[in-house]
Image: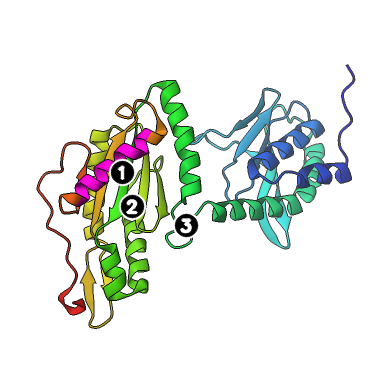
Amino acid sequence: MRKPPTRGAPGLLLDLVRCLEPADLEKSLLEALLERLPGATALVSLQGRTPRPSRIASDRGVHRFPAGAPVPPLVAVPVMDRGEMLGWVGYADDEALGDRRDAALAALREVAEAAGIPARNARRHAATMELALRDPLTGLFNRRAFEAFLDREVHAARRYRRPLAVLMVDLDRFKEINDRLGHAAGDEALRCCARAVEKTIRRADVAARLGGDEFAILLPWTTARNAVQLGGRLLSALEEEPLELAEPRPARLVVGASLGAADLEQAGGRASRLLELADLAMFEAKRAGGRRVAGGPPPAGPLPPPHLPEDSR
């Protein structure tokens, strides 16, 4: 079978500009490098100046570069656009490269030159997609993103029979904060909650603002009992993120929240039921006075009820 001809610079550029996702562009770059130097090991990174590759390719195929793996000696060329380094392309400087270093440099320069504009486009596309999935006020994911993550994690939890929990969070007396202290204070209360959430969750967890003063946290590999424990830590983190008030007199307000936990086993494996149970638990916590977690074993020691500063009454 005849091998297809190597794509020249114009054809390569045309192929690369079609890759809007950074991961797709990385794969196309690796394939272009292997076309030009068969048998070599190619590596790429589209993460600026980082020395760690994102992906690696050889005759065995294209793979993510293993986390924690040592980076081999490289022959590499930067990917540039408008004077900014957007990443790099390279070959492993090993026995497979042999005496082909001059050919490797020529191939790298050709691919790197074609990659500049596509790399800029992919970065812009990734930034646009990130904005579309984020809540602009808090920086957390929005409802649309949360629902997509929920579908994915429920599918994985069912398939691999692993636990999955949701923690619903609703701020206490949020309307009163807005009415008495103004919407700017309400917005800052939401940001305080978001900061406390980010300090509390793990890297694998997904936190979102669903709308208004309602937040949700998706917790892979977690039971309702563990979610209640995390909820207790979140309430403690809220204590450490008070709302700073400048008017009518400087004051600090601890933002309270009611939390509800549920897991997929309790929900019979259904995503909609999982959210419903977590919501019901959250309302149970609110009816009990707020600033607590419901849906599992209660945290040790009841927390005091929320209060607004005397100055604002």
Q: Please state if 179 lies on the left or on the right of 161 as rendered.
A: left
Which sits earlier in the primary sequence, circle 1 or circle 2? Answer: 2
Residue at the image position 30 percent from the left and 37 percent from the top? 277
Residue 263 placed where, x, y %?
31, 33
Kind of residue at disc 3: Asp
Kind of residue at disc 1: Asp
Q: Please state if 109 lies on the left or on the right of 138 as rendered.
A: right
Residue 194 placed where, x, y %?
36, 57
Give the mark toward the camera: 3 or 2: 3
Question: Dot 3: what SS?
Answer: loop
Q: Which residue is labeled 1 in the image? A: 279
In the depicted structure, whether residue 310 falls above or below residue 86: below
Q: Main secondary structure of the magenta part?
A: helix
* Magenta extent: 273-286
Q: CA distance from mark 1 to mark 2?
A: 18 Å
Residue at the image position 72 percent from the left and 43 percent from the top? 19
> Which numbered disc covers residue 197?
2
Q: Which residue is labeled 3 in the image? A: 135
Residue 177 placed where, x, y %?
27, 69
Q: Residues within 10 Å of mark 1 (few under 14, many from 20)?
A: many
Q: CA distance from mark 3 to mark 2?
A: 14 Å
Which sits earlier in the primary sequence, circle 3 or circle 2? Answer: 3
Question: Dot 1: what SS?
Answer: helix
Tag count in the figure?
3
Kind of residue at disc 2: Val
Q: Is residue 292 visible?
A: no
Q: Is residue 134 visible?
A: yes
Q: Residues within 10 Å of mark 3 (few under 14, many from 20)?
A: some
Residue at the image position 43 percent from the left and 31 percent from the top? 154
Q: Is residue 279 magenta?
A: yes
